[in-house]
Each structure stands twice: as C-alpha cells, then as structure tokens.
Image (tube, helix red, strand yellow):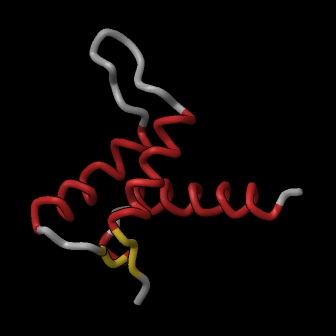
Amino acid sequence: MLFISLPELEAAINYWRNQSPSVGDALELCPEVSALAKPYAILIIQGAQRLAVDNLDSKALAAWNTYLSNVHKNIDSP
C-alpha cells in the first residue's frame, strides 16, 4: 500500500496553489486544491502523519497523480 505523508500533501497543495492562485472576491480555490483539502484536513484533525493513496477520491487522486507527474518531469529536465 502506498502512502502520502503530510509534507508531501502540503507540497502538492502548494504546487497547485502556485499553478492556479485563488481568484475572485471569495478567493475560490482551484479544483485541485479543493480536492486535496479534504484529505489534508482529515490528516490534521486525526493528528496523522500519512494517508493511504487508496483513501483518496477520484478528484484528489487525479490532482495527486498530475502533481507527481509534473514534479518528476521538472526534476528530470535539464
């Protein structure tokens, strides 16, 4: 089983916040940050340090996988 640590989840949220900053008077979050916010809140409330990837819903999983792909692409680029 694969896990996401709290710092990894925070990094993914920050990545998406930099890609799509909050907009409008209400400072609405982009869909990816919104999707990752719930698992983040669960970790904080439970005082946990990691979350099983299997526990992510489809939107959060898509945001997580896209984040991983983009980060690894940037690391591998010269």
Residue furthest bottom as drawn: 1
Residue 30 horizontal/vertical position (percent): 43, 33
* Front in this rendered view, residue 49 or 57: 49
* Front in this rendered view, residue 74 or 29: 74
The total number of labels drawn is 0
Q: What residue is rendered at 40% in x and 90% in y?
A: 1
Q: Where on the picture, by quarter, is residue 24?
A: top left
Q: What residue is rendered at 29% in x and 49% in y?
A: 37
* Front in this rendered view, residue 59 or 1: 1
Residue furthest right as drawn: 78
| Quarter that holds the C terminus | bottom right
Q: Please give left or right for residue 59 compared with residue 46 in the image.
A: right
Q: Is residue 48 above or below residue 67?
A: below
Q: What residue is rendered at 33% in x and 20% in y?
A: 27
Residue 48 horizontal/vertical position (percent): 19, 72
Residue 65 horizontal/vertical position (percent): 55, 63
